[in-house]
Amino acid sequence: MACLVEECSEVQKAAASAMRFGLDDKGISEATAVKRLSRGCADLLAAVQTLSDERIIPLPRSRTLGASIEKSKAHILDSMEYARERGTLKE
């Protein structure tokens, strides 16, 4: 669980940095912001998968996982549309 929390934090930090400075920003790193974000997401997925493998958290079965992901994506897109309507999200 500690690894999950840490990886969530890393993704949050990488995403915030990419939003603030741009996806191509390297800052003091050799990797771009998008590369750091991608690596953080992979680490987060690995932490989630490990927790599932150890039967600590259940994940949807493979046949329903796609539907769960699509439902989550629809929710995200709805939220983004609402933000556009409110004027807080621009293209």
Image (spheres, rainbow, N blue to C red):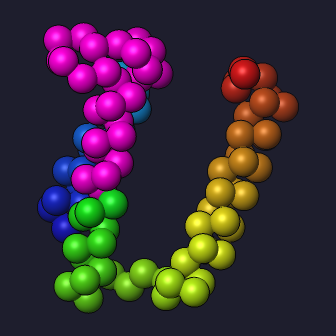
Q: Residue at x 24, y 64 (%)?
A: 47
Residue 89 appears left or right of 48: right
Q: Position of residue 39 (x, y in %)?
A: 28, 42
Quarter holding the C terminus?
Answer: top right
Residue 91, relative to residue 77: is it above or below?
above
Q: Position of residue 38 (x, y in %)?
A: 36, 40
Residue 51 picture quarter:
bottom left
Q: Residue at x 34, y 24 (%)?
A: 33
Residue 15 appears left or right of 1: right
Q: Residue at x 29, y 32 (%)?
A: 36
Residue 3 magenta-highlighted:
no
Q: Residue at x 30, y 72 (%)?
A: 49
Q: Position of residue 35 (x, y in %)?
A: 32, 31
Give the magenta range: 18-44
Residue 32 appears left or right of 86: left
Q: Position of residue 67 (x, y in %)?
A: 65, 75
Quarter holding the N terminus?
Answer: bottom left
Q: How many marks?
A: 0
Q: Is residue 14 visible?
A: no
